[in-house]
Amino acid sequence: MWAVSSMAQFTNASLKAAGLTCSMCSKAVKKALEDVAFVQEVKVDIKTQEYNLVFKESADVEFDVLKKAVEDAGFSVASLKVTGSFPEVHVKKDSHVKAHGRNFHFLNGNGQALRGEQTLTLVDKDFLSDKDYKKHSSVSKLECVKTGKTGSCCEKEGMGAGERVYHVVI
């Protein structure tokens, strides 16, 4: 495994919420997401229960803040895909990358380069349904992925004790 540091500007995201039963539920989640400081715009696709978020330019995007906003509205995150601009960053399966101030553990990858706009799917326990989490946690041999205890794998890679690590797939 290896670690690379690079900059990426996250520009937008696609978030699915779980537990929605009516249009009032959908409206509550939309309002909660609109109240997040770094969110510029929220568009809702009612058929798919998907929220398309546009982030403010040069904003410090915090994925856990999005999750908390959804939870504070009384629901949970079923899927979060984030799109950002990357310089050339090579990723391998179970590799670590520090991008835009965030630590990412790539559960897939075959040495390909991330360049330009790329979409990452967060696969940490609180960003997926239980079924999808089990599917993704089985692809890595690393204990942090299997247990859901973020950070332990990257501490070994010198990313810092206690730093938040997001597990992602391309």
Image: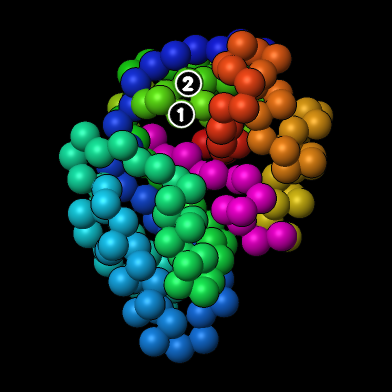
Q: Which mark is residue 98?
A: 2
Asked if the residue at tag 2 contacts the one at tag 1, i.e. Cβ–Cβ closer than 8 Å, the answer is yes
Question: Is 91 left or right of 28, judged from the image as shown?
Answer: right
Question: Is 127 left or right of 13, judged from the image as shown?
Answer: right
Q: What is the span of residues highlighted in magenta in the rendered image?
A: 118-130
- Depth order, front residue of 123/116: 123
Q: Residue at x 47, y 39 (%)?
A: 120
Q: Position of residue 53 (x, y in %)?
A: 31, 56
Up-down: is 128 above or below 170? below
In the picture, the quarter occupied by the N terminus is top right
Q: Kindly identify the amino acid type of the residue bearing the numbered disc 2.
A: Lys
Label 1 sits on a secondary structure element that is: strand
Q: Position of residue 66 (x, y in %)?
A: 42, 54
Answer few, some or many: residues within 10 Å of disc 2's Cα (few below 14, many 20 plus, some between 14 and 19). Answer: some
**Which image quadrant for residue 93?**
top right
Tell me, yes or no, whether the highlighted magenta stretch contains residue 78: no
Q: CA distance from mark 1 to mark 2?
A: 5 Å
Tell me, yes or no, whether the highlighted magenta stretch contains residue 121: yes
Up-down: is 113 above or below 33? above
Q: Residue at x 60, y 36 (%)?
A: 167
Label 2 sits on a secondary structure element that is: strand
Quick check: can you spot residue 110?
A: no
Q: Kindly identify the amino acid type of the residue bearing the numbered disc 1.
A: Arg
Q: Position of residue 71 (x, y in %)?
A: 51, 65
**Which image quadrant for residue 14?**
bottom left
Q: Which mark is residue 102?
A: 1
Q: Which mark is residue 13?
A: none
